[in-house]
Structure formats: structure tokens, C-alpha cells
Amino acid sequence: MSATTAAATTDVAAAAGSPSTSSTTPPRRRSHLRKRLELLILIGPATVLFVAFVFLPLIAAGYYSLFDWNGFGPLVDFVGLDNYTKALGDPLFQGAIGHNLFIVVASLVVQLPLSIALALLLNGKIRGRTALRLLVFTPYVLSEAVTAVIWLSLLQPHGVVDGLLEGAGLGGLVQLWLADQNVVMFTLFAVITWKYIGFGIILFLAGLQGVPDELREAASIDGASGWQTTRLIVLPLLGPTIRIWIFLSIIGSLQLFDLVWIMTLGGPGGASTTMASYLIDRGFRRYEFGFGSAVAIILFVICFVFALFYQRFALRRDTQGAITGRVE
Amino acid sequence: MMNTRSIRKHVAVGAVAVMSIGALSACSGGDDSGDGTTELTFWHNGTADPLLGIWQDAVDEYEAENPDISIEVVPIQNEDFATKIPLALSSDNPPDIYFNQGGGLLATQAQSGQVADITDLTKDWIDGFGPAAANWQVDGAQYGIPYAMHVVGYWYRTDLFAQAGITAVPTTMEELDEAVDKLKAAGIPPIAVGGKDRWPDAFYYNAFALRECGEDVLKKGLADADLSDDCFTKAGQDVIDFIATEPFQDGFNGTPAQQGAGSSAGLVANGEVAMELQGTWDKSVMQGLTDTDLDPLLGWFPFPAIDGGEGDPSATVGGGDGFSCTQEHVEECVDFLHFLSSDDIQKKLVEASVATIPVNEAAAESITDPVVKSIYDFNTDAAYVQVYFDIALPTGVGSALNDAVANLFNGEGTATSVAEAVEAAR
């Protein structure tokens, strides 16, 4: 991947540099050597890290997943793909996949329009803009664990949230936020939105800086209304940012763990179990590390396949040539 | 703007991060420094006072007496031991001393080869612990020792019981149901349970099974991980029937057991709910969650008897808290654990209600609180004390049992679903 790109770049550089040095052979050889050295220095450390902390654990997990293994001692009880069929056949895991998909879809439907709208608003010339930007970005800076603990206490029955709703005369809206199986996913989604909306806004604000003022001015001279300018000029130019946001959002939704684990432990009754919380619950609580590895591989494959397809079909126009090696 | 490389790295790193959560945080110290001091790492679950302070004081005292030993104290939230211990035991550098509750979980951990067999090192003094030490044995070998024993029963608020007009503690299920009704009538949520953590739910199944099953049937069922006897089905039905009387606080399925004022322990500590079925250690947890002195406000009674059950009403579920040693500094570790069972420290544990049932009998004399004394006597007179089912069973089976009982609390499952879950996990 990155190796090909970098190699191609250096080739071009070497080719461009060669005429001036072609009269004598030593410099040429030196540049060749230098090219290799550059490659080694630039790509080496990353490759080592990638192999040690990504590739090898992945292979190990794949291997463990073929055994019935409690995490200790030798791998002796080979069970083939049993762990996979057991996981995919478990209604609790099927539910977990459903919960992840709920977060994926809800994020796209709710967070995306909301972040763009707020970014457009904060991009305008309004009083206290910097303070507002800071405010919406603050939750994103908090760690997920801190966020989870804060909201866990706010959402206790008869807690702060219930009190605020009752104070506002909306006592009828009070729910068992984390204890009702029909409500808990919506509660979690609200907390996720609270936490990550700021990230989307900052991303889109950055994207909006890339929309030239001249285009808007030209559009308004041509008589376009504000809404038309936004819809026909600004949003299309924001396209690459939107596609990146969607990518990050979906991957994040598929891997959702910390908030769920701290706030509900996947409960009540599995109603907020995600693929990752199911993985940890089975692996660590039951000492079923072979089975947990199988779940991890399933989660990885889902994320990886999505990432590949998304890169190939959605991100391609933003990152031409990065995957196929072609520059179109 | 982000480029493809960093995105792809994000994907890959993210995917693997999920698989290796906690791996990095599980590292521990324990290296010997150059000056001849032996450094021990000590993982305990006393994240709040009084236990936090007691362990720190004990370590300070021990270090003063043993200048060649230095102990790094690492308090870890009780629920986090589930994830930290397996990682630590599969690493090259596990903690030298770590908290556990013995039983099937310790037996599984011992398979790592990292947990030290301390039979020989403890044989001169372990008899003083009586039957309590047996729960830390695997195949007859000692793999750890307890510092406190507990039984499970109801902690209740005497003030709220009085307010609801309850004059005597319930001794039968009918009386408990009546008490629940009276509390409800007085506008007091009757019983707190930490359903989020699941194991407190399981206490109900444990307790009912002890009342429905004869001792032999119960012990055989747990030994074989086979709960197909009728009495276990009755226990399952008892749980369902009891939940149907709606005795628990609002949102009990989302309530944590021990963490914070909103936990089931916190609700009782702050007088918002009248009682809780918990281990006897719970008093010290509750005291850590309120500034009010709970001594005059808390009472205790054992799980009530039920009509027609085969079990002895004086039998109880219980267990203990203890520590195990890993291989590297086993002698130093055992010496420290022996120190923890000394009269002095045991008395401190008793006085702080961390240990209602001390492992050192000498400390029992220092029990002054009449409520704690009644628990101590109840334990002494009990027909037998059954270790918590999830600890007694092999790890995976025990967790499956807890999950199945938690599902009953969520209105899912039948009288036989716990037995079925155990069967499936066996």
C-alpha cells in the first residue's frame, strides 16, 4: 500500500534527478543506495510497528479462534470453525450486530445533518463564535470513560436528567434511561451524539474553509438565494469531508465499546450488547479466549470489508490512485 | 485533510485495539531494584476507605518491619479484576500478590502455571483458618489464603423499617412479602439490587436454591454443573415469582452494585431504599458511600425460610476474600499474607466491618457491634455455608449462570432457563 506509493514517488524523483548525474557512475549508484536508505528509514519503523502490533496479533487471534481455549496453557482442543458457527448462531451476538447497525444508521441520519447544520451556523459571522466552537468541541476532548461515568450518574433514576425534565414540566418524558430494554440504545445514542458531534463540526468547519468565497459571491451576484448557494455550491464542495466523516463514523459505530461497557455492561438483558462488549464479556468474563478471538475476527472482517469497499467505491474520487496505483 | 494512509492505519489500529483492550494496562512492576530490596506488587480491590486505608497502613507497617521489602500497592476496582487477571497471568510479569475469591475461578487461573502452590509454606499455620481456607485449594493444594469470610443476607435500615411499621425482621417469605408491602405503602422502595452487574441478581437464585434443595442434591448439582433436579427448577420459579411482587427499586436492571451513591449499596446507605440482599462486606461499602454513621441504622437478617423447601433454613451462601501469590516472590508473598492474618490487622478489618467473619478467631473477640456479632454467630451455627454458585462452578459456567439469572430479572426466561444455561456452558 503506502510502500508502492512511496516507491513510485522516489522513482519519479530519481528519474528526474538522473540526467544531471548521468556522466559518472558513482553518484548514480549513490543515489540508488540513497533511495533504498530513504525507503528503509521512512517505511521501516512503521512496518515494524504494523507487523508487531497489527499483523501478528491478527494472525494470532485467527489461530486462537480455531481452538477451545481458556487463555492459559497449550492450545490442544482444536475445534475448527465451531467458534464461528457458535458465535453467529448466538441470538445475543446477532442482537449485538443489530445494535451496532442501529448506531451506524442513527449516526448517519441524525449526526451528519446536525453536524453540517451546526458547522454552517458556526461558520457564519455570529457573536461569540470562538466560544461556541470551543463549547461544542469540549465533549470530544473528554475520554469515553469520563463521558460514560458522567452520564451514568446523570441518568440515574430520580437523577439530574429526570430532575431537569420534571423541572421543565416534561416529567412525562422521564424514562428508565439505562434500565429499560426498549430505551437503552436510544439513550446510548444520545450520549454518543453529545460526545462526537463536536468532532464532526470541527471537521466540517475545516472543510468549509476550502470553499472559496469567490464562488459564493459569484453565486449571489447571479441571484442565488442563501439556501441555493449552500445546496448547490457549498455542500458539493464539502463532499470529500462528508465522505471521510461517514467513513470514520461507521468504523467507530461498529467498534463501539467503552461507553457501553461502563454505562450498561451490555445490559439490561443484552439489550445494549455490541460486538465488542460481547467479545470482552465472553473472552474475559468466561475465560473463553478461543471463542472471543473468533468474535474479534468476525468484527475485524466486518470492519475491513466495509473499509475496502468504501475506499474502492466512495472515497476513490477523493484519493485517486492510492489503492489501484493508477492516477486517473 | 486526512490522507488514505492515516485512514487505513486508523482502521487497522482500531480493529486490533479492540482485540487487545487492556493488554497494555496490565503490565505490573515487581522488578527487583539494585539496592537489594525486593519489590512486590500488590493488587487488591479496596478502592475506597476503609479497606483502602487498612491495606495501605498494613503495607506501611510491614515495610517498616521488613526494610528489605518494598510493596507497590495497586488498588483496582473489583469488577476490573475479571479482565486484568487473565492478561496479567498470561504475561511474564504478573502481580506478586493478587485478590481473588478462590473457587472455580482460582482453579482456572492456576492452570496458567503462574499461581504459586503455597501448601508447604502455609502448612504450619493454615489450620488456624478452619474450613475457610478450603475454598483456596485446588486438588488439595493451597493456592491462596482468605483474609475475611462473608455470608449473604439482608442488610436493612432500621429507621425505614420502623417508619413502615415493621416490628420484627422477616423470617419467612410470607413475612418478607408483608414487609415489602408495608414499605411500599409507606412510599419507601423496599429492596435494592445492583442488576447491572448481574452477580447480585444471582444471589437470589443461590438463596432460593439453598432453601429448595437438600444439601446433598445441591452440592452434587454444583459439583457436576448439572442443575436439572426439580428443586433447582423450583428455585428458578421462586425467583420469577419474587420479581413479580415488584419489590425492587426503579430501574434496578441498570443499577450498579457497589460504585457510587446511585448504586444499590449507595441507595441503602443514603436511606433511599430499605434493604439489600448482599454479602456482609457490604456494610463497609455502604459506609464508604455516606457521611452518616451507619452503625445505629443498619440491621441484618438471613434469607428467609420458605414453605416446603428441602433445604435447612440455617444454611447460607457465602464465601471469602483472599489473596494468591505468583511464582517469582512466593516466600515474601506468603510471609506478607501471614502478616495480614495477624490479630492486629484482623481486628482492624473487623472494626471497619470489612470482615464480619474474620479468619483469625482471636479477632472475633473484638467484635463489639451487636449486629456484626449476630452475623458471626449465624455463620458459626449455620448448617453449612455454600460458596457463591458462580465461584463454585467453573468460570464460564458460573458466568453463564449469572447471565441467565439476570435475564430472569429482565423478564426473560423460565424456571428452567438457568439450568439450561449451565448445561449449555458446561
Image (cartoon, rainbow, N blue to C red):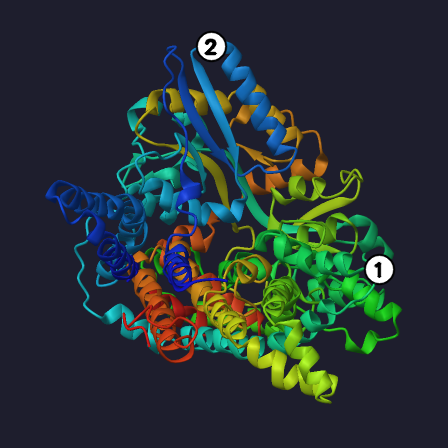
Which residue: 81% across, 59% down? A128
| Closer-to-camera residue (B244/A287) | A287
Quadrant where the N terminus of chain A sits is: bottom left
Circles 1 and 2: CB atoms closer than 8 Å = no
Residue B102 seen in the current view: no
Q: Give the structural element (helix, strand or loop) at label 1.
A: loop
Please check whether the numbered discs 1 and 2 fall on a single chain. yes
Q: Amino acid at mark 2?
A: Pro
Q: Position of residue B229 (x, y in %)?
A: 39, 69
Q: Position of residue A94 (x, y in %)?
A: 42, 77
Which residue: 81% across, 57% down? B166
- Gap in Å between the C-alphas at discs 1 and 2? 57 Å
Q: Amino acid at mark 1?
A: Ala
Mark 1 and mark 2 lie on one chain; the one further toward the N terminus is 2
Q: Position of residue A82 (x, y in %)?
A: 24, 71
Residue identified by numbered label 1: B164
- On the image, which quarter does residue A183 sit in? bottom right
The chain under label 1 reads: B
| Closer-to-camera residue (B390/B36) | B36
B238 relative position to A38: left or right: right
Which residue: 33% across, 55% down? B223
Q: Residues within 10 Å of mark 2 (few under 14, many from 20)?
A: few
Q: Position of residue B426 (x, y in %)?
A: 31, 63
Which residue: 43% across, 62% down? B3
Q: Is residue B170 above or below residue B27?
A: below
Q: Residues within 10 Å of mark 1 (few under 14, many from 20)?
A: many
Q: Give the structural element (helix, strand or loop) at label 2.
A: loop
Residue identified by numbered label 2: B67
- On the image, which quarter does residue A88 sit in? bottom left
